[in-house]
Amino acid sequence: MRAMVYRGPYRIRVEEKDRPVVEHPNDAIVRVTRAAICGSDLHLYHGLMPDTRVGTTFGHEFIGVVDEVGPSVQSLKAGDRVMVPFNIFCGSCFFCARGLYSNCHNVNPNATAVGGIYGYSHTTGGYDGGQAEYVRVPFADVGPSLIPDWLADDDAVLLTDALATGYFGAQLGDIKEGDVVVVFGAGPVGLYAAKSSWLMGAGRVIVVDHLDYRLKKAAEFAHAEIINFAEYDDIVVHLKKITDHLGADVVIDAVGAEADGNLLQHVTSAKLKLQGGSAVALNWAIDSVRKGGTVSVMGAYGPIFNAVKFGDALNKGLTLRMNQAPVKRQWPRLFEHVKNGYLKPSDIVTHRIPLEHIAEAYHIFSSKLDGCIKPLIVPTES
Ligand SMILES: NC(=O)c1ccc[n+]([C@@H]2O[C@H](COP(=O)([O-])OP(=O)(O)OC[C@H]3O[C@@H](n4cnc5c(N)ncnc54)[C@H](O)[C@@H]3O)[C@@H](O)[C@H]2O)c1
Ligand SMILES: [Zn+2]
Ligand SMILES: [Zn+2]
């Protein structure tokens, strides 16, 4: 089969690879009809995720058609259209029993923290991902769901991560009616988090980024107030000014460890590797939320040290909430919202690119070229 293959930082190409086979009775093999590139894939692409091995295939957002099932699979059969959450999870361990699907204990030899994720380095289990013609789906009776008839492929693929994550970000914010919500990052996760905040009763939603074309999307798609942080000496002071000098009730970090906006952080992380990433957005979140407020972190951070203002978080009495999204938990509500027309996930898709040209897709998404917000990959026809 043809598959995206990692060759080292900033180097990927499409190669011929063995088609995956059923390795366990509860596996399914899925022919991929849509995949997406996530902001998280950029951390791999930039060489920042520990134990990202040459030769692996990325891709944790995908949908497809079941090609083959193992002998114990009961809920799927060949020919079914399925959407597959980015988490690989067993459904029955201590953590899965508590809905912590992203922290499953049975799917990753390093499972003291994160569980299994498709195509996301050996830190999350070393599974090959869906930016390929075929992918092996373990625990096929647990993760995937049939795609409802009314859900288009371009929408379904966005529920496998980006939309579920944005929605989860708003959920963890514990938004009360009328709350002021600030979202850092106008990428796919931030856009969906902003849109979801209204569904949970926010009174004001403000999105902060430095890319004007993405902020424009935040105004159109998520009906948010928008702020370009590059236009202010101190974005935290500005946010305080426009929130009665109290700060926001809820702040959502949808940026993660590759944040721009602070030279010192950039030099100590990306250049000198003295810390696991740049915690600029997280520190802005801690500084711009009001005392007693909630910071919800969806942006990805590596396992090692970051200079985070933890003391300030303590002294302000903040609630910090975070996790990899347990995607399947978000689906029932998201199905309702999409079916009822409150959310049209594919409104943020800017590019549809054949698998053969995926290297170009990574380049334009990484460098934010050509108005790129969310690129979809088409490995095989629906
Ligand atoms: N927790 C989860 O389950 C989960 C799931 C998906 C993605 N993620 C993470 O969420 C983050 C966002 O993903 P995405 O797909 O939207 O990525 P993206 O790269 O498309 O978007 C990130 C945005 O943040 C902006 N930005 C950079 N520095 C900023 C700053 N200091 N303040 C405000 N904005 C800033 C960038 O300009 C960009 O528009 C990534 O870190 C990704 O790894 C987490
Ligand atoms: Zn992702
Ligand atoms: Zn489990």
Image (tube, rainbow, N blue to C red):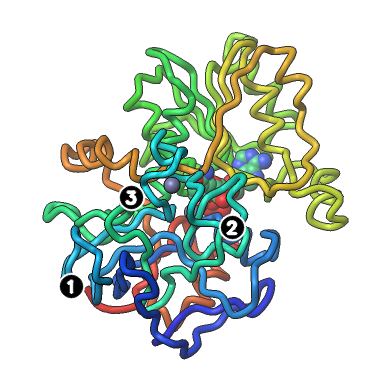
Quadrant where the N terminus is found in the figure? bottom left
Give residue 377's position: percent from left, percent from top. Answer: 39, 70
The amino acid at mark 1 is: Ala
Q: Quadrant of residue 368?
A: bottom right
Quadrant where the C terminus is found in the figure? bottom left
> Looking at the image, is 224 positioned above or below residue 159?
above
Give residue 335's position: percent from left, percent from top. Answer: 22, 42
Total label count?
Answer: 3
Which residue corresponds to the image point at 54% horizontal and 57% vertical from the top-left? 108
SS state under label 2: loop
Q: Which residue is mark 1?
A: 78
The amino acid at mark 3 is: Leu
For disc 3, the neighbor class at 10 Å (few under 14, some 14 to 19, many from 20) is many
Which residue corresponds to the image point at 45% horizontal and 61% vertical from the top-left? 60
Foreground residue, 372 or 321? 321
Q: Which residue is mark 3?
A: 159
Task: Judge from the rendering whether residue 66 lies leftward or rightward of residue 169; answer left or right.
Answer: left
Give residue 341's position: percent from left, percent from top. Answer: 19, 39
Answer whether labels 3 and 2 touch (C-beta < 8 Å): no
Q: Which mark is residue 109?
A: 2
Task: Judge from the rendering whether residue 174 lies leftward or rightward of residue 228; answer left or right.
Answer: left
Which residue corresponds to the image point at 55% horizontal and 82% vertical from the top-left? 13
Say whether residue 138 is visible.
yes
Question: Is the CB–ligand 3 distance for label 1 below 8 Å?
Answer: no
Give residue 183's position: percent from left, percent from top. Answer: 53, 32
> Looking at the image, is 194 positioned above or below residue 312?
below
Which comes before the other along the chain, label 1 or label 3? 1
For disc 2, the neighbor class at 10 Å (few under 14, some 14 to 19, many from 20) is some
